[in-house]
Image (tube, rainbow, N blue to C red):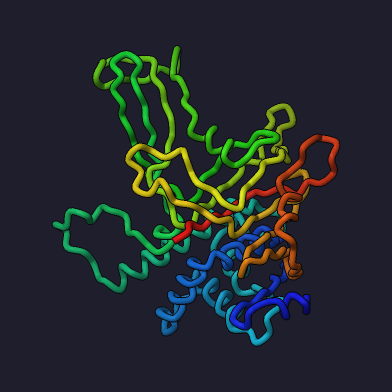
Amino acid sequence: MDDIGDRFPDNEHFFGLVNFGNTCYCNSVLQALYFCQPFRDKVLVYRQQQKNSKKESLLSCLCDLFYMIATQKKKVGKIAPKKFIAKLRKENESFDNFMQQDAHEFLNYLLNTIAETVEGGSKEAGGTKPKDETDSKKPETTWVHELFQGQLTNETKCLNCETVSSKDETFLDLSVDVENNTSITHCLRGFSSTETLRSEHKYYCEECCSKQEAQKRMRIKKLPQILALHLKRFKYVEQLQRFTKLSYRVVFPFELRLFNTSDDASNPERLYDLVAVVVHCGVGMNRGHYISLVKSHGLWLLFDDDNVDKVEATQLEDFYGLTSDTQKNTESGYILFYQCRE
């Protein structure tokens, strides 16, 4: 690890996180988020703003952990995120055990919890709004939403009168189905593919005042600053009564442009760069291990709990997944973090 320290600028730190008994799901996501620079900046600014607050929250523990990493005298080493893990287990009983958890569920919980904490803090700071304000029902937009939130539009076209109705919904990450020997682009194409609603699934058309055959598709209306893509690698198999892992080979590029945008998308030309990958190792949902790959100052690093190693960019291909069932390597990209180019 010493040669890593010599290769990097003085203002960056690379610290592995100690595992407290199957907490790799947490460590891998925290490393990915730490190296999403806009997120790290917001967390450290929030810590500065809240430094006189005595209220401990999961966010305050995250702030302290990020600050601890960012202010280390050494460039490389390891840190025990003891306070953060203790708070996580206290706040959410799902994580209050020594079993392997799902990294995507943790990411989801963490982002939503941070957003709620920030929202709660801004309400306390700003007082209550007058009752007659028209936007009182509008949800608060926090810096978490500014970074991660995108918007989908669900379009349904009646095949009888051709009227198109659309309904918008927001997301903090996108979950996409996976198929073997494909790419992220293919997965996103599947996500936005047109589905025909017929027979017992017919759509009730307001214009026709009756159930009609229709075409439905989901497209992206607002592209987020940080795009978190979750590959749905765990599938429930009825016959086995359990989840099995789809170790399919799915290629993820270093650069990504989304094409499945709506006609009225605000920023359809947005170009993304891959900044972090959370990798699942193993064949099962509850028996595997998580590691993360992050990009920093043009170089790639692999974080495996408290171990930090430099890797070549070409080695990321090892984490696409399997090309056949006979291969033994089960390390496959599970959550991808893409950051838009300014």
Quarter placement of the N terminus: bottom right
Residue in the image at 76% along x and 69% along y: 307
Q: Quadrant of residue 231?
A: top right
Q: Nearer the viewer, residue 6 or 302?
A: 6
Q: Quadrant of residue 62?
A: bottom right
Tally the numbered discs. Answer: 0
Residue in the image at 54% along x and 64% along y: 36
Q: Is residue 162 left or right of residue 306?
A: left
Residue lying farthest to the left in this orientation: 132
Quarter placement of the C terminus: bottom left
Residue 184 location (% of width, % of height): 59, 42
Residue in the image at 71% along x and 46% along y: 320
Q: Is residue 96 left or right of residue 77?
A: left
- Placement of 5 over or under 299, stated as above or below: below
Residue 149 location (% of width, % of height): 42, 53
Q: Quadrant of residue 274?
A: bottom right
Residue in the image at 36% along x and 70% along y: 121
Q: Is residue 94 left or right of residue 270?
A: right
Q: Nearer the viewer, residue 109 or 246?
A: 246
Residue 105 location (% of width, % of height): 58, 51
Q: Is residue 85 left or right of residue 118?
A: right
- Placement of 67 over or under 298, stated as above or below: below
Residue 31 location (% of width, % of height): 63, 65
